[in-house]
Amino acid sequence: MLPQPSGAQPAAQPGAVLRSSFATSLMRYRRSWGLWLLLLIAPVGARFMISDESGRGVAIAVADQLPVLTSAMLGVWLGIVVTTLLLPVGYIYLRANTNRRQPWQVEEVTAAPRVAMLLGRFAADAAVLLGTLGALTLAGWFLGWLMVSGPYSLWQIAYPLWLIAAPPLVALAALRILFDAVPWLRGGLGDLAYFFVWMASIVMPLLGANQPSSFTANLFDHPGFVRPLAGPEPAGEMNVQIGGVDPATLKPGRIDLDVAAGLHAPGYIAARLAWIGIAVALVLVAGLIYRPHRSGRKQAGQGRIAKLLSAGPPAAARADAPPAPPARSALLGLVLAEFRLIGAGRLFLLLAAAATLAGIFGDYRHIGSPAALLLLVFALSAQAGRCEARGLLKLTATTATLPMLRRAAFVVAGLAWSLLLALPAAIVRGSGEPLLLALTTGAAASVTAITLAALTGSSFAPRVVLLIAWYVYFSS
């Protein structure tokens, strides 16, 4: 073996890099208060999401009947709550929490293998999400002691829960790593991409539901709820419903499901393990395509399209201009300022015109109102994130305007935009229904955006939460 030249640095060992990345990521999680909030969300949410005898909560109906709440069925129910409803909460935590701020300025100038570094981060993310699943298991055991019909079994609660929920949580950790590896997925576009991925994961099980149980059919079932509810045979006329179940439409009595037969259906367990393998493969791909955090050669807003759609340069300063007179109403000026900032840029005005036309010529409840609300989701979350940034709050604290007054002005301005987009549709139809819808949706979106931005200091959490709420509103 040839001796190394003097002054040469030893090559970084992948195993050591992986262990170091895993340990430092876990340390960031441990120091984050958001970790404890995440550990509480799943158990507390599950208590209110599990349907009682009246059908309230996230009801699961099979053949127009609620299932008998056995120990195994409770585990399935908890797993479905995680894979369909709580995954966005985990995504928000991984992307918006303080631990996402990796020391890339130091790491990316080293010779450390990117694959090993990302595998360490992935292992830490997966460990935290699975720790949340462990907390949910403890809560499920307690709920089972209170709610289960028939024999009480800790194993029959934990086994279905982990078999259903663990693969999607591991896949979520991998998806976060993949998004962090691609520059254009590190921001708002990545959040929008996850929104569509999450919706697709809920729709995918329908592709294999009417087929006999097999590895391929179960691979489409990313949330993992089809076989435990429908069994090994094709779902057919089973009419599986999750959420949005009207208790008045249910048949009397409860249906006793053979959960064990569904969990051990041909290809089901192999498909669940395959999703874990897919998650690891995504991390390996992320390590191969990883791009450093570098500023682009061209500054934002310098392209032709960006210049065309921007708000344009401010007016030139006049040295001989007289001093501005005092504002007649400071509160009105604050509302107008928030109104202008929410609707800044020619692109917003162009999209606002398109949403208004959609409301005039189409069904307002299912076309115009969702189009206007989707536009406001991005505009409100962006402005809320800007005005609630930690650095800017220190500056605004020196002004005479109270923070809550500024936030109230934001809500009023957001509501004004919502009503303005609905006004042409109300005039054309001669009805106040569009304005009532705009009043409700605009107020809810504005309050949610400014509240979540104030709590998190960024636009990420309000954007993701409002996108999910928009999907529920659009599909209802």
Image (cartoon, helix red, strand yellow):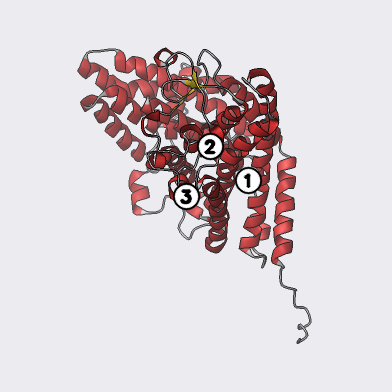
Query: Which numbered disc, 2 or 1, marks the residue that appears first in the sequence?
Result: 1
Which residue corresponds to mark 1?
Answer: 100
Which quarter of the image is occupied by the C terminus?
top left
Image location of residue 308, percent across then percent down? 33, 47
Residue 463 lies left or right of residue 373; in this view the side is right
Mark 2 surroundings within 10 Å by alpha-carbon count, few (fewer than 14), some (14 through 19), many (20 or more): some
Q: Residue at x 50, y 35 (%)?
A: 464
Place of residue 408 in the rendered image (x, y in percent of width and height, measured from the top left): 52, 19
Q: Which badge, 3 or 1, is on the more N-terminal residue?
A: 1
Q: Nearer the viewer, mark 3 or mark 1?
A: 3
**Viewed as shown, does residue 400 lie left or right of 379?**
right
Q: Is residue 7 visible?
A: yes
Residue at figure coordinates x 53%, y 26% from the top left: 450
Q: Secondary structure at mark 2?
A: helix
Q: How far apart are the two marked residues, 2 and 1, measured between alpha carbons?
A: 41 Å
x and y percentages locating residue 99 in the rendered image: 66, 44
| Residue at mark 3 to residue at mark 1: CA–CA distance | 35 Å
The residue under label 3 is which amino acid type? Phe
Q: Is residue 235 left or right of residue 360?
A: right
Image vertical order of residue 419 relative to residue 391, above or below: above
In the picture of the structure, the residue carrying the numbered disc 3 is 215
Mark found first going from the N terminus, 3 or 2: 3
- Judged by depth in the image, the label closer to the viewer, 2 or 1, is 2
Query: Can you tell which mark lies on residue 146?
Result: none
Q: Name the residue that disc number 2 marks.
A: 261
At label 2, the amino acid type is Ala
